[in-house]
């Protein structure tokens, strides 16, 4: 067998363990910073205030307006706030919305980032930034947006609502599933994909039944780190293109969109690359798309786009946008096939593969 590949590990320092978030001040100092601005969404403003208080003199305050899909106007306000306070680093506390804001600020100003994830989004370990402006979402890759330090504290996820745990976890699985057939995949990312999906397959049903199960929360966060790391090292394909289209142009919720689309996009590609999709069948049992659909339904995931404000009339435009400048994909795509895929996802039908 001939093996040939290129591999570049993430430069981010990963700190993982129960209670790890108590030492964020240590990592602020490790970056030789003294004036941290704590970021969060409005929903986690109290947690951001508590983090700023724990940091004491190392914090200059908070910015708590992080928003889903990282609107450019919010980023500009946050950059202005950081300049006004003389912040020399940011501590992003929360999920993908807060992480995205920190990354967008770093892209513009090179401000160092410490991320403390409280969901399973995974974007904290990627060089990918998605932003929305004028009703469109664009993505870019740059080493400037990769956080310097990521502090994973499973204890911070104990209170993550079950519904959000499910959709966030399925979002993470999507990163790994696409990594299996990425054009620039390698043996290391493939191993991470399989291990990350196995961890989440094990943990999510337990979390649904026992939300404060510490071992399951630890396993899920470990799986999310692996899946996010895969996303950060390989090219995205059809699944992420469609989700970026729906989120950026139709404002569908991020994690829920990934959860609903996952079985359909993976099933669509599985028809063309059955060998590469074998790990999904082995982990979840059955043909890849149907197995993921059945797993998602068994843990209470939303199953239909129509339940999140997308009208059937929107599907034609969504198919047009998703097939314009498409990402690399192992199965050829056209507007008709993607329109049919979106119809199934909109209706909540079980995919054919």
Image (tube, rainbow, N blue to C red):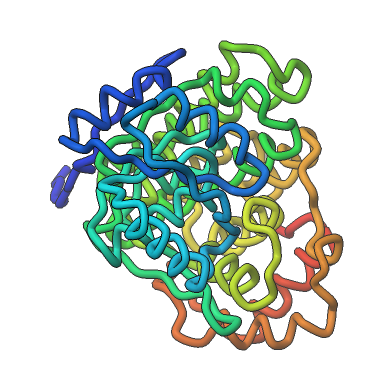
Vertical comparison of 223 with 180: above or below: above
Horizontal and vertical percent position of residue 334: 57, 84
- Left or right relative to 287: residue 324: left
Who is closer to the viewer here, 300 or 39? Answer: 39
- Quadrant hosting residue 130: bottom left
Name the residue at 59% across, 58% down. Answer: 67
Who is closer to the viewer here, 331 or 52? Answer: 52
- Quarter of the image for the C terminus: give it: bottom right
Name the residue at 45% across, 65% down. Answer: 75
Does residue 256 show up? yes
Vertical comparison of 279 with 158: above or below: below
- Left or right relative to 165: residue 144: left
Horizontal and vertical percent position of residue 44: 62, 39
Who is closer to the viewer here, 108 or 3? Answer: 108
- Quadrant hosting residue 46: top right
- Left or right relative to 341: residue 320: left
Name the residue at 35% across, 69% down. Answer: 140
Vertical comparison of 30 with 83: above or below: above
- Quarter of the image for the N terminus: give it: top left
Does residue 233 show up? no
Name the residue at 73% across, 76% down. Answer: 340
- Quadrant hosting residue 304: bottom right
Horizontal and vertical percent position of residue 71: 53, 69
Who is closer to the viewer here, 163 or 178? Answer: 163
Number of numbered discs on residues: 0
Horizontal and vertical percent position of residue 263: 66, 53
Vertical comparison of 175 with 118: above or below: below
């Amino acid at each position: 067998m001939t093996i040939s590949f290129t591999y570049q590990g993430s430069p981010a320092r990963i700190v993982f363990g129960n209670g790890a978030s108590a030492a964020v001040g240590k990592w602020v100092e490790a970056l030789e910073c003294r004036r941290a601005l704590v970021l969060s969404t409005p929903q986690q403003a109290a947690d951001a205030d508590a983090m700023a208080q724990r940091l004491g003199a190392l914090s200059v305050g908070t910015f708590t307006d992080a928003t889903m899909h990282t609107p450019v106007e919010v980023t500009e306000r946050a950059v202005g706030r950081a300049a006004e306070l003389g912040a020399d680093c940011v501590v992003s506390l929360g999920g993908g919305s807060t992480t995205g804001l920190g990354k967008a600020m770093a892209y513009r100003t090179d401000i160092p980032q410490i991320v403390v994830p409280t969901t399973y989004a995974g974007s904290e370990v990627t060089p990918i930034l998605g932003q929305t402006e004028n009703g469109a979402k664009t993505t870019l890759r740059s080493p400037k947006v990769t956080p310097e330090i990521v502090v994973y504290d499973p204890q911070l996820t104990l209170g993550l609502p079950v519904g959000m745990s499910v959709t966030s976890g399925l979002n993470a699985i999507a990163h790994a599933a696409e990594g299996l057939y990425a054009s620039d995949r390698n043996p290391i990312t493939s191993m991470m994909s399989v291990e990350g999906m196995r961890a989440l397959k094990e943990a999510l049903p337990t979390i649904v039944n026992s939300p404060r199960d510490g071992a399951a929360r630890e396993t899920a966060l470990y799986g999310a780190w692996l899946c996010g790391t895969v996303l950060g090292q390989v090219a995205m394909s059809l699944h992420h293109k469609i989700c970026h289209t729906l989120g950026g142009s139709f404002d569908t919720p991020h994690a829920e969109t990934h959860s609903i689309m996952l079985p359909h996009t993976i099933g669509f590609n599985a028809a063309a690359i059955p060998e590469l999709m074998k790990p999904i069948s082995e982990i979840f049992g059955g043909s890849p798309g149907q197995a993921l659909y059945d797993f998602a339904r068994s843990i209470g995931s939303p199953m239909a786009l129509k339940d999140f404000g997308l009208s059937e009339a929107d599907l034609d435009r969504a198919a047009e946008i998703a097939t314009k400048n498409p990402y690399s994909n192992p199965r050829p795509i056209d507007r008709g096939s993607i329109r049919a895929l979106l119809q199934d996802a909109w209706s909540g039908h079980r995919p054919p593969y």
